Amino acid sequence: MRVLKWILGILLGLIVVIFVAVYAYLRSTLPDYNGEITVSGIKEPVEIIRDSYAMPHIYAQTDEDAFFALGYCMAQDRLFQMDMVRRATRGKLAEILGKDLVPVDKFFRTITAGKSFEDIAAAYPPEIRAASNAYAAGVNYFVENHKGPLPLEFTILGYEPDPWESSDGVAVKYYMAWDLNSAFSIEMLYASVIHKLGEKMANDLFPEYPEEYPTIIPDGKASFNFFRNLTVARELLGAEGGGASNSWVISGKKSKTGKPMLANDPHLSHGAPGIWYEAHLISPSMDVSGSVLPGVPFVIIGANEHVAWGFTNVMADDADFYIEKLNPADPNQYEFKGRWEVVKVKEEVIKVKGAEDVRFRVRLTRHGPIVDDVNKYQEPKGTALAMRWTAYDTLHANPFLKLNTAKSIHDIERAVELFKCPGQNWVYADDKGNIGFWAAVGIPVRDGFSGAVPIPGWDGNHEWKGYVPTKGQPHLRNPARQWIATANNKHVGYDYPYPISHYYAMPDRVVRIEEMISEKEKFDVTDFKRMHSDFYMVLAKEWVPIMLKSLSDEELSEKEKKALVALKNWDFVANAEGVAPTVFHATINQMVKNTFMKRIGEQLYEQYINNSYIAFNAMRNLIAQGQSVWFDDPDTQSVEGLSEMIIKSFEEAIAYLDGKMGSKVDDWKWGELHTLTLYHLFGKSSSLMGFFMNIGPFPIGGSFATVNPQPYRLSSPWEGYHGASLRYIIDFSNMENSRRVIPAGISGNFMSPHYDDQAELWRTGKYRPFVLDRKSVEEDARYTLKMLPGKLTN
C-alpha cells in the first residue's frame, strides 16, 4: 500500500511539473510590451503606449519610424496570422501543412499569375515603397531579436517564418481582393444553371436588384463549382467571400451636437484572431487611428483629427471569364481576331511538407491566367477558360497614406483616384461639416455585354474598353436629406450606363437603416450604438403575413398551432430569447429547399445556397409574383402553388424542431439553436486545441439581413460565421465621445489576456473609447515600450 502511495505521489508530482513546465513555456511565447530597447533601424526615439486592451499608440518623430514600430507591434501580436495570409496568397501552404494543400496552392498561384507581387510593389510611388520597407524592417527586427520562442503555432507546425518582404503587403491586398470577390464562384454557377434549365429559369435564380428598394444615391441617377478548391481555401482561411457591411453618416444638421457623425461595421468572416488589428500612429504627418490589416502599414478604416471614413463592399463584378479557342494543331496557341497568339507559360514549383516538390505550369492569354487546372467548369472541347480580373490592373494603386494624412473631404476625394480593387463604397466626413460617398471601384467598360457568364475570347467583341473614369463613378456630397447610408445595395438606377454588379446584397439592411434614420430628427452616439445592435427583420415583416394567410385554413397539430401563435405575436425582432425567430428561420430554410432543390438538382443546389443573398433575393422576387412554376413540386401529379409550398415547409420545420430541440415549443429559443464561435485555425480540426484557442460558443440573435448581421450557412445551419468584423462610431463634436470595438482582441496568442478581451463587449453591443489625444492615451496606459535608435547591443 505504501509503495502504491509513493507511485501515485510521484505520478502526481510529475503531472504538476509537466503542467508547470508547459504553462511556463506557453507564457514565454508572449511578447514583452514594456521596457526600453535599442533598435537598429529607426532614426529617432519611438514611444509605444499600449492601452488597457493592448492597442498600440505609436509616437514617432518620423513617418518611417512610425511604420517600423507598427510592423514591430504587429509581429508581436499577429505574426502567425500574417504568415498564413502571406503563404496562402503566395501559394505556399503545402510547404507547412502537407500535400492536401497542394490544390489550394495551385489555385492561388494561378489567380495571382496575372500580375506578380513584386511587379505591383515596384509600381508603388516612392512614399508607399518607403512605408512598406520600414514596416517590413520592423517585422523582421522583432523576429530576429525577440526573446523567447515564437507563438505556439510555429512550434506545432515545425517551422520559422521567412523574412517579411515589402511585397508581402501586396499578398495581403490580393487576399482581400479575392475574399471580397463574388464573381469567381457565381458566374460559373450561373452558366451551369443556364445550361441545365435555360436562360429564363436561370434568371429567376439570379435576379436583378429590385427597383422598389433603396439605392445609395436617392434619385437613382448618377459550370458549376468554379474552382473546386475555392471552398477548401475559404474553409481553411475562414474567408467566406463577398463581404457585406454597413456604413452611414449624418451631417451636423441631423446630429444633436451640430457636427457630423459616422458609423461603420464591415461584415467579414469571423475568426480568432479577427481579421483586423487596431493601432494609433502619431508622427509629423499623421495622427490617425483605426483598423489595420496585419501585413499592411496603413490604417484602412478609421479617423484622424480632421476626417473619418468607412467602407462597405461595392459587390462589384470585377472579373470576367473568357472562353479561348485553342489551335487543334498546337494547344499552346489560341485564337484572337482571326490570328493565333502564343500562350505564355509560367513554371511553378510547390514545396510540400513530407513529400516531393510538385511542378506545374500556369498558362496565360491576353485576358489572364487559364484556370482549367483549378476549376470544374466544363468548357467545350478545344477551348480553355481564362480569367480577367481588375486586380491585375489596379492593385498597384494605394490611397491609404493620403487617407491617413487627409485634412478635408477634398483630400479624401483625391485619394479615391487611387482606389479600384477590391471595390469599396467610401463614406466619409470632415470636421468642417461635410459628408460624402464615393463608389471607389474599377468599373470595366463593357460594350454590348454584361460579363455575367463566360464570354467568347476569340472574336475581339467582348474586350474591356478601359475603366469608367473616377468622376463617372457614383458619388454624392452633402445631400439635401443630410445623411447617406450604404449596405451593399444598388448604387444608382437602371439608367446608369455601366454594369457595376449582378450580386447586390438583400436590401433589408439598407431599408432598416433608412427607417431608423427617418424615425428621429436628431441623433447622438447612443442612437448609433442602438442602430449597430438592431435585430429587426424586414424579411419577416414581409413574409410572416403571407405565411399566416397560407396557414389560416390548414388543420394543424397542437404543436404547430403553438408555433403559429408565436409567429402571430412576433414583433419581428430576432432576439436570442425568442421562439418566433426559431420557427421563422426553420420554415424559410425549408421554403428555399422546397422551391429550388428538385429542379436544379442537389449538387447545383448545394453550390447555389452558398450565397444566401442570391437565394433569398430570388425567393423574394418569386413570392412577390404570387405564383411561379418554382413552387410546384415536380415529383407530384398535382400543381402546387405558393400556399402549398409554405404549408409543406412549415410542417417540415416544426417536425425538424421537435426532433432537434424537444417537444416543448417554449424551449425553442433562437439563441439555443443559433450560436457563434470564433474559431482559431487549429480549433476547427482539434477539439482539444479548440477548447483553449476558440472563443465561444455564444448564443446570438440576428439573422442574414439584420443590421446587426448574424448569418448562418443554409447548407449547414445554425452556427454563425460572418458578421461585424469591427464597429466604430465617430463624433466630430468631441472625439472623446467616439467608440470602437472588434470581436476578439488585439493579440493572436491565446495565452494573452488580450486574445479575447473585447469579445464580450462586441457580443453585447458595447464599445471602448476611440481616442486621439495624448491625455486620454496616458490615462488608459497599461504598457509602455521605448525604442532608442542605435546599434543592437548584446
Image: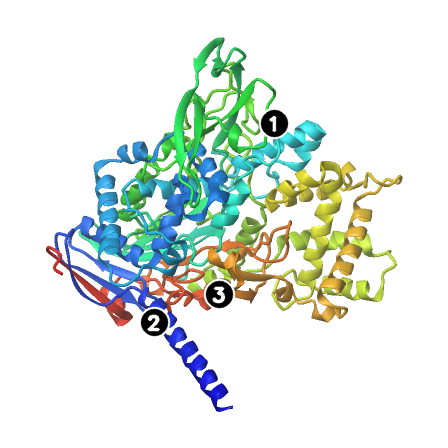
The residue labelled by disc 1 is: 378
- Mark sitting on residue 765: 3
Is 193 located above or below residue 518 in the figure?
A: above
Residue plotted at (42% across, 53% down): 275
Residue 348 locus on image (x, y percent): 40, 31
Residue 241 in sight here:
no
Quadrant where the C terminus sits is bottom left
Q: Which mark is residue 24?
A: 2
**Mark 1 neighbour density, 10 Å: few (under 14) some (14–19) many (20 or more):** some
Q: Residue at x 80, y 56 (%)?
A: 651
Q: From mark 1 to mark 2, how far is it between C-alphas?
A: 55 Å
Q: Secondary structure at mark 2?
A: helix
Considering depth in this image, is 357 or 435 the residue closer to the camera?
Answer: 357
Please give left or right for residue 145 compared with residue 608 in the image: left
Can you tell which quarter of the image residue 555 is in?
A: bottom right
Image position of 68 (left or right of 77): left
Which of these two is toward me, 28 or 77?
28
